């Protein structure tokens, strides 16, 4: 319930699937997906970071599974991008900012 009260934007923190023991670094978007305009309402999308951008944290999708998210900080407000290329570039930047913030030790996993 708390996530739905956040202002629209991109955040970083920690995520844990109910089946997991460990918390994992994540970036999340709370927004209306203005670049795609493919639905109504606010969505919450969580990207669980892997050990690198090329190696995802999970081998399979986990849609429909229960996840707990601990939001540690705000990266930027939601913005509309002119192209998918621009969006992907900014997502990579957001992931880098999140990794740096979480690696600083100021935002320990719960």
Image: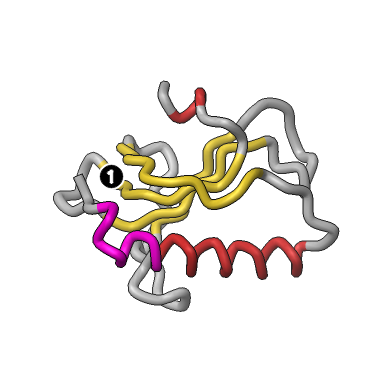
What is the quadrant of the N terminus in the image? top left
Image x and y of residue 56, in percent: 40, 68
Q: Does the magenta stretch include residue 27?
A: no
Q: Is mark 1 on a helix, strand or loop?
A: strand
Location of residue 43 in the rendering, given as x and y in whole percent from the top left corner: 59, 34
Nearer to us in this view, 22 or 72: 72
- 71 or 15, which lies in front? 71
Dividing the picture into quadrants, the one containing residue 106 is bottom left
Q: Circle 1 sits on which residue?
A: 17
State the residue lying farthest toward the left.
Answer: 21
Q: Residue at x 75, y 66 (%)?
A: 86
Q: In which quarter of the image is residue 72?
A: top left
Residue at (44% x, 43% y) in the render: 63
Of 3 and 36, nearer the camera is: 3
Q: Nearer the viewer, residue 40 or 107?
A: 107
Q: Residue furthest right?
A: 82
Q: Specify the segment rendered in magenta.
A: 100-107
Q: Where is residue 70 in the image (x, y as percent from the top left)?
A: 32, 40
Quadrant containing the C terminus is: top left
Total tally of numbered discs in the picture: 1
In the image, residue 7 lies at what x, y percent? 58, 31
For image coordinates 79% across by 40% down, the residue present is 37
Q: Is residue 104 above or below residue 108?
A: below
- Residue at point 39% right, 48% down? 62
Magenta-colored stretch includes residue 102: yes
């Amino acid at each position: 319930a708390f996530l739905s009260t956040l202002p629209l934007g991109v955040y970083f923190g920690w995520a844990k699937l109910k089946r997991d023991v460990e918390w994992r670094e994540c970036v999340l978007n709370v927004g209306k997906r203005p670049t795609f305009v493919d639905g109504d309402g606010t969505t919450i999308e969580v990207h669980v970071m892997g050990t690198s951008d090329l190696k995802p944290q999970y081998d399979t999708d986990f849609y429909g599974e229960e996840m707990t998210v601990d939001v540690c900080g705000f990266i930027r407000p939601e913005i509309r991008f002119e192209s998918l290329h621009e969006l992907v570039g900014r997502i990579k930047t957001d992931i880098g900012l999140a990794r740096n913030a979480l690696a600083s030790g100021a935002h320990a996993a719960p």
